[in-house]
Image (tube, rainbow, N blue to C red):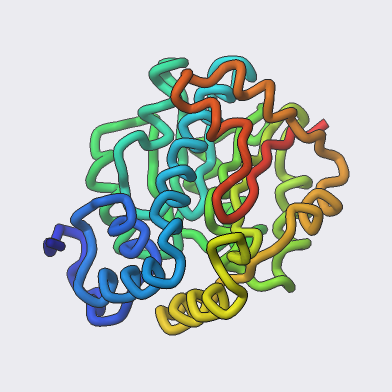
Amino acid sequence: MGTSPEGFAGIDTSVPNIARMQDYYLGGTNNFEADRAAAEKVLQLIPSIRAAVIENRRFLRVAVRYLAGEAGIAQFLDIGTGLPANGAVHEVARAVCPGVKVAYVDYDPSVIAHAGALLSGDDNAIAVIGDLRQPADLLADPEIREHLDFGQPLAVLLLGILHFIADDYIPGIVAALRDALAPGSYVVITHIGGYVTRRTTAEEGDAALRVYAMAGQPAFPRAEVEFTRLLDGFELIDPAVMAAAAAPDERDAASGEAIVGWRLVARKI
């Protein structure tokens, strides 16, 4: 049963919201009837979507632990962070490397209100409104620039966000990251690659995409190769490297195939 948590004042909760649908998939309570109804429609079409969202959170933990530990990254920029959930980036990273700095970014005011409330009193973590479709503005945001040192390596997390951005924006986003990041920085991406599997037909996948479009957030499945060909100047990290550093119950999330998409970690050369 959803609640009416602080941070939703002034938000139209009668319209489905992607962040709140994700919260519902994860078993959270920061969602409303419209969100639950839309999420249930997707679950009827693609029952594995809940497992995919949970898997995405597991991969976040695997990647962050690897980056904060093996890779020595002490700064994280989490774009499209979604509603706060257990195992947030700053919690996972600081278990490996105390003092890690994190900037959370989302274009949804209710998300930032929630994150800001949770981070109150934490000098090493901030929450900022920003839109990845305007990457130059986001990366130049004064609050982010004051918090993170772009002259040093950092990790940019793009987990489950790029498939909600239209094709025309993607090359510019990748180019802006390449230009802004110091050598030794990382990008982490998870993305839906199409819903057509042995358990899901093209018709069911198309119907699920229509549900997201009706929620005001069209989705754009893409193949991994569409991104790897844009990553000139980056080197892909072998999934087996991260799997070796993962907890035993998370090694599949590090090295196995994603349920409904793909994931990658790349280092700027």
From the viewer's perspective, is residue 118 above or below residue 27?
Answer: above
Would you say residue 137 is visible in this rendering?
A: no
Nearer-the-camera pick, 153 or 210:
210
From the viewer's perspective, is residue 143 above or below residue 11?
Answer: above
From the viewer's perspective, is residue 111 above or below residue 190?
Answer: below
Quadrant, the C terminus: top right
Q: Residue at x 58, y 72 (%)?
A: 201
Would you say residue 32 is visible in this rendering?
A: yes
Q: Residue at x 59, y 65 (%)?
A: 195
Quadrant, the N terminus: bottom left
Q: Residue at x 55, y 67 (%)?
A: 200
Quadrant of the rendered image containing residue 40: bottom left
Query: In the displayed image of the protein, which residue is found farthest to the front?
Result: 198
Residue 93 location (% of width, % of height): 45, 25
Residue 56 location (% of width, % of height): 48, 45
Residue 257 location (% of width, % of height): 63, 42
Nearer-the-camera pick, 143 or 72:
72
Q: Residue at x 49, y 59 (%)?
A: 130
**Residue 55 placement, left or right of 36:** right
Quadrant of the rendered image containing residue 38: bottom left
**Residue 21 placement, left or right of 130:** left
